[in-house]
Image (spheres, rainbow, N blue to C red):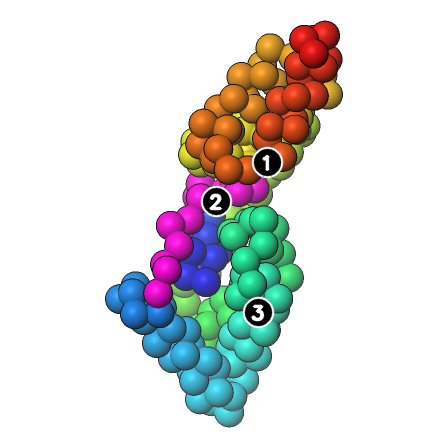
């Protein structure tokens, strides 16, 4: 959850797949801190329901829509940027509510003061930076080869990314690079049976039965 919070606030190193070090026990200090922090966030959402209803609604929106993709029962992708598409609407509401609150506190009834102007400038810069990041990231999704080459620059230990890149190369008829990608994926995760099947497909394409 906190990885997603970080990616929403600072959308750097975005990737279709993220490699995570999972905890194996609820007694793990990091796990315990995470649970307490998440519980605190739920309480904060409830606490703000009258004082700041828009922020409260946004927090609840994020938490409720995060639950289906939270991997309480682990799936293929533990963390993926696309899982935040719907929850991010709540995040935008939180930013709007926070900005509205700050702007109101800076107000001087009838006169737009220097603090308000500075705040507007800062918000404008923030929106421009997020917009520029969005436009730049669109180029990553031009095709599968570009996407998974980018993903491997961000998460070089992702066997799923190597598998997907191998499939992209195979679709293009580049069997040599496909073979290398599947081999690298097997090196990272030798217990994943699909990888051997994919490599077998390459052998078949090459006529190496």
Residue ID at (47%, 35%): 189
Residue named by callout 2 = 18
Please identify the quadrant where the C terminus is shown. top right
Would you say 16 lies left or right of 26 here? Answer: right
Q: Residue furthest top?
A: 207
* Residue closest to the eye, 143 or 209: 209
State which region is magenta. 12-25
Residue ID at (56%, 63%): 73
Would you say 161 lies left or right of 173 here? Answer: left
Give the crowd class for mark 2: few <14, some 14-19, many >=20 residues within 10 Å. Answer: many
Nearest to N terminus: mark 2 or mark 3 = 2
Residue 198, percent from left and from top: 65, 26
The correct choice, above or below, for 96 with respect to 173 in the image is below
Residue named by callout 3 = 67
Nearest to N terminus: mark 1 or mark 2 = 2
Q: Which disc is residue 150 wearing?
A: none
Residue 112, percent from left and from top: 44, 71
Residue 106 appears in the rendering: no
Residue ID at (29%, 65%): 28
* Residue closest to the eye, 60 or 134: 60
Residue 81, percent from left and from top: 55, 49
Residue 79 shown in magenta: no
Q: Secondary structure at mark 3?
A: helix
Q: Which disc is residue 193 wearing?
A: 1
């Amino acid at each position: 959850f906190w990885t997603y919070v970080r990616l929403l606030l600072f959308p750097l190193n975005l990737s279709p797949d993220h490699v995570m070090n999972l905890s194996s026990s609820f007694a793990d200090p990091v796990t315990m801190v995470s649970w307490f922090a998440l519980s605190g966030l739920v309480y904060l959402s409830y606490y703000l329901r009258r004082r700041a209803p828009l922020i409260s609604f946004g927090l609840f929106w994020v938490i409720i829509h995060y639950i289906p993709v939270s991997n309480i029962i682990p799936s293929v992708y533990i963390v993926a940027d696309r899982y935040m598409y719907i929850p991010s609407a709540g995040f935008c509401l939180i930013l709007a509510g926070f900005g509205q609150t700050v702007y109101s506190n800076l107000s001087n009834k009838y006169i737009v003061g220097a603090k308000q102007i500075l705040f507007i400038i800062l918000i404008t810069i923030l929106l421009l930076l997020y917009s520029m990041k969005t436009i730049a990231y669109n180029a990553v999704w031009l095709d599968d080869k570009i996407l998974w080459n980018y993903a491997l620059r961000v998460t070089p230990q992702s066997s799923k990314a190597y598998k997907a890149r191998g499939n992209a190369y195979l679709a293009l008829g580049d069997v040599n690079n496909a073979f290398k990608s599947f081999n690298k994926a097997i090196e990272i995760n030798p217990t994943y049976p699909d990888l051997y099947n994919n490599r077998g497909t390459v052998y078949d394409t090459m006529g190496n039965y």
